[in-house]
Amino acid sequence: MKTGKMIAETLRRIVYPPRCLLCGNLLDFRAESPLCENCRPERYLPAEPRCYICSRPIGQAGDRCPGCRNHQSRIRGRGTFVYDGAVLESVHAVKDSGMKAYIAGYAELMIRYDGPFWRGQGQFFLVPVPVHARRLRERGYNQAGILAEELAKRLVVPVWDGLERAEETRALRGQGAKSRRDSLAHAFSVNREIPRPQGMAVIVDDIYTSGATVESCAKAILEAYPDQEIRFWTFSIRT
Ligand SMILES: [Zn+2]
Ligand SMILES: [Zn+2]
């Protein structure tokens, strides 16, 4: 960096101290990491070996996690971090306390750790998991939508908003895998008037839990476009 730029950046950091991308803690203005001491991202990276479908750590012989074996999940993808500790608290803050400012940080971190993987996948576009209109009014934003935009900006790939929430689903938190699947069976539909970009569709969300949401999104996309190749990419994955 040029000296002038460095001085400007230092002044900016003193006036607007950087905050941890996960927990929002103030960072030292000289900080080089975007995360505070408590939130070292490496500790939340899923351990190998991982399920070849959902990327969850499996910690045993075999290629798929029990969830993917039992539910015959077919949509492959990656969750960048394990849903635990600071990651879990951060996702809750975004969902429940209006901390949408964290989402740009999620995109930074996702690209830092999983960007090389996706860049090796050829042409693709991002599909945010839509929220129901009532939830959107309550929260004021769709965190998956913002996440997809933040990722797209940095990766220079298109976002496709052709996936829509078809009907209201009961809050999924706390439901078992089977009932999540039942409530989501017809939750999404495709708006064919929104042109679909070329390449693989990558469904984007803040968290991957049972895989039911991703499967349901994929089902709707495949009903409209049977030959569409589909993957998913979430900020976090529940283990
Ligand atoms: Zn932190
Ligand atoms: Zn799995």
Image (tube, rainbow, N blue to C red):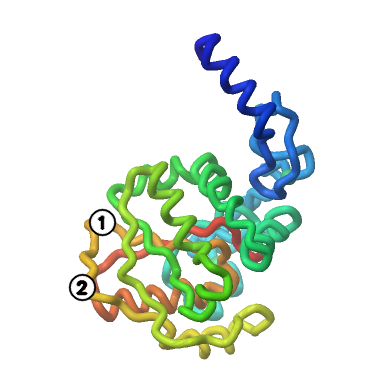
Real-space Cα distance between discs 2 and 1?
Answer: 18 Å
> Which label was assigned to residue 210?
none
Which residue sits at x=68%, y=55%? Answer: 87
Q: Residues within 10 Å of mark 1 (few under 14, many from 20)?
A: some
Q: Secondary structure at mark 2?
A: loop
Which residue sits at x=47%, y=57%? Answer: 146
Q: Nearer the viewer, mark 2 or mark 1?
A: 2
Q: How many marks?
A: 2
72 lies left or right of 156: right
The amino acid type of the residue labelled 1 equals Gly
Ligand 1, what quadrant? top right
Residue 237 rendering spot, x and y as whole percentages:
60, 62
Determine which quarter of the picture holds residue 30: top right
Q: Secondary structure at mark 1?
A: loop
Residue 209 sits above or below residue 88 on the image? below
Which residue sits at x=39%, y=49%? Answer: 152
Residue 229 rendering spot, x and y as whole percentages:
30, 64
Determine which quarter of the picture holds residue 119: top left
Residue 58 visible to an observer of this rendering: no
Ligand 2 within 8 angstroms of badge 2 C-beta: no
Residue 115 sits above or below residue 125 on the image? above
Q: Residue furthest front?
A: 15
Residue 128 rendering spot, x and y as whole percentages:
42, 64
Write down the residue under mark 1: 199
> Which label was assigned to residue 193?
2
- Which residue occupies the foreground of this view, 162 or 47? 162
Image quadrant occupied by the C terminus: bottom right
Residue 106 sits above or below residue 168 on the image? above
Contact flag, marks 2 and 1 (Cβ < 8 Å): no
Q: Residue furthest right?
A: 38
The amino acid type of the residue labelled 2 equals Glu
Which residue sits at x=23%, y=74%? Answer: 225
